[in-house]
Every structure is written in C-alpha cells, then in structure tokens.
Image (cartoon, rainbow, N blue to C red):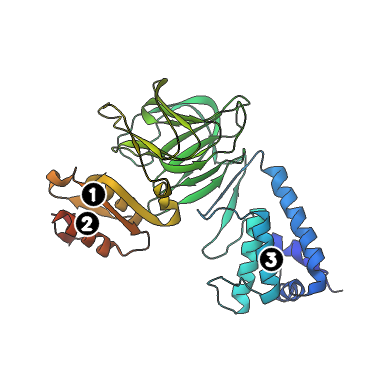
Amino acid sequence: MEQNAEQLFEKFLKGTCSKEELDRLMELIQQHEQEATFRLMLEKVYQQVDQSITSDIFVGTPAGVPSKNESEALWEDTARNGQLGNSPFSKNHKTAIKSIRYLIATAACLLLAMGMIYYWHITKTGQNSQEYSKIALNPSKKQQPKMTFLPGTYKHQTTNRAEQKYLLLPDGTQVWLNAESTLIIPDQFDSLKRVVYLEGEAYFDVKHADKIPFIIHMPSNVTTTVLGTAFDIKAYANQDYSVSVKRGKVLVSKDQKSLATLTVGQQIKMNVAQQLQPVVKTVKQEDIAMWKEGKLVYDALDLQDIIQDLERVYDVRIELKNNKLSNEVITTSFNRGDNLDSVLETLAVLTGTQIRKSGDVYLIQ
C-alpha cells in the first residue's frame, strides 16, 4: 500500500526514507493539492519547537534560524521548482532534496546533514553539561584572568579558529559567537536574572524581559548588564576588551563598580591587564559586529590587534618582527573570503613593511 504524504514526511524527518520514498515525497511536495497537508505538518513542527525552546539551546551556522514566514516562503519556492530559487545548489534531484532538508531543519532544528548549513540540538543531558563553582576559562591557552561562576550546571559552546556559531538561548536571546571564543550558559536561567560567561567575542541580541536583566561575565570581573538590546563584546586574552552598542542601552562594570552606561553607537575600550582608564568613544553603528556578515572592519585599531584577529579568522600564525609597529594605528577593511596573501600585502603597503613566509608562519618585517 502506498504511503501518504504525512507518513513520508515523518520518515524524512527521522532520516529513514529510502531513495524511492524520497522521490515520491518530492513529487507530492510539488503537487498543488498537497499544499494544505504540508503546511499543517510544518505548523506542527513549529509548535514542537516553540514548546521545547524554553528549556534547550539551539546551535547552528551564523546565518541564524529563519522566521516562520521565511521558511514558508522557502517551502513555496521549493514546491514550485523542486529546489530553492536563489540557492547556489544545482538543479539535480540530489541537491533539491538537500534544499528541502535545509527548509525542514531550520523549522525543526533537527540533526540533518545539508552541506554548508546545519543545525544540531544540545540536550540537557550528556557531556555538554558540567558542574562549576570556581573555574578558570582559558580556551585560547593564553594567560587570562580567572572567572568565578555561580554554583550550578552549565553548558559550554566553543569555537575554534576560522569558525563561528549561531546560538538561540532558552529565553529567545540570539548570540553570534566569533572565532576562538567560549560562551558558558546555565542549564536554566534564574527567575531574577539571566547570567552567562564569555571569553572571546560575541554579538548579543538580547530578548527583552522586564525586571530580569541579562548579565555577561568576562575575565577580570568585568560585566555587562542589559534588559533587552543588541551589542558586541570583545574579550580576548592579551587584548583590550571592548563593548559596542548597536541598539538600546548597556551598563558596563568592573569589580561591581560602574564604568559606563553606553547607548547606541557608543563603545568602551578597557585595558584590563594594565588597569588603564577605560575610554568611551562614538563608533559607526553600521560597522558594529560586521564580522558576522563576513566583513572585517578595523577602525583606528593597533596593528598587533589586527594581526591577532587575522590569526583567528584564517587559522594561521603571523609574527610582527618589528615591535615598534605593534601600536601603529590602522584603519582598513577586508572581506572574510579575501585571500590572506592579498590581505597581508595591503597591511604591508599601509605600514611600509614586507611580508615573508617561513614554513607555516607569515613574517611582517
């Protein structure tokens, strides 16, 4: 007996479809009379996501999770053409199936292999959760002051060099985690406050919650407190810390003492190692966290800081042989996909230096 659309759809979500069943599912998706059936099934998937999101964390590529309307639009396009109209995928049957898998994965956040785009579900059990009381957070293996954790059970998300992650937290807050960074999240947020711990760089779009502040702890007892806003935090070892506000208002503190209250287009920079006076300045709002859009923007940044950033982005070693140039201020920008050699050549022109490669190390001298 032939299986109906709902049975095939359920088998597809479980990853148990045969090739013949996938062929049949593709045919049904493109039939106009099946539209109501698939919309109903998609609605059920979203209801399941809504019910689970209060207690779990979803992780994926920095592109994030499309909205329900966006997913429905993708579904309609797929039903018409058997593939995503603006997708880089080719028109063969195999890639059309991948396109539909992408659509369903963004709706259900299921574990599906889809080439460049993927999502997976971090459950509340297993090795992702750890007990913390006081712990040193040092994923970059560089000297970094310790952070003190509140007692409880936490999950951690870490990126390697040349890697980024998108996270949707249980309260609806979105986080884009940049390369070589770690975010530690409690299994369950407190009813009075939402506390996370960060080393590295992340862009937060915090879900507003009246009287329930969202607090980010960083090494050296630096904290950022908000109710609902969007901002970038950079807190790498051996570099100045910075907080830049894209939307809303942010309170930055150290050792429980207020340093500054930032509004849209403001940035604070702190040298926590030398305990220098923090500097607050105005920055271009549109340039904040452009790294998550694939753009590397350096506005009046020290050459050494730019080098360290490029090492994380390209997963390479770069040495500046002339230490006098470490603090030379540079303003420039690149695309994340630019060839590293051309990026370094641009820096060489700006600084009057030369680039040489010795083994796996790039030398600027």
Q: Could you tell me which residue is drawn at 59 percent across and 79 percent down?
A: 91
Q: Which residue is mark 2?
A: 347
Helix, strand or loop status at disc 3: helix
Q: Which residue is mark 1?
A: 330
Left or right: residue 358 versus residue 270 is left
Left or right: residue 127 versus residue 100 is left
Q: Which residue is mark 3?
A: 75
Residue 108 % position (x, y): 67, 54
In the image as oriented, which residue stretches furthest toward the bottom?
92
Q: CA distance from mark 1 to mark 3?
A: 46 Å
Depth check: give the residue in front, 360 or 55: 55
Q: Contact, CB < 8 Å: mark 2 with mark 1? A: yes
Q: Contact, CB < 8 Å: mark 1 with mark 3? A: no
Give the mark nearer the N terminus: 2 vs 1: 1
Q: Could you tell me which residue is drawn at 71 percent across and 72 percent down?
A: 79
| In the image, residue 114 above or below residue 284 | below
Inspect the image, locate mark 1, and give the three-letter code of the amino acid beneath it.
Answer: Ile
Helix, strand or loop status at disc 2: helix
Inspect the image, locate mark 3, and give the three-letter code of the amino acid beneath it.
Answer: Trp
Mark 2, other Cα within 10 Å: few <14 / some 14–19 / many ≥20: many
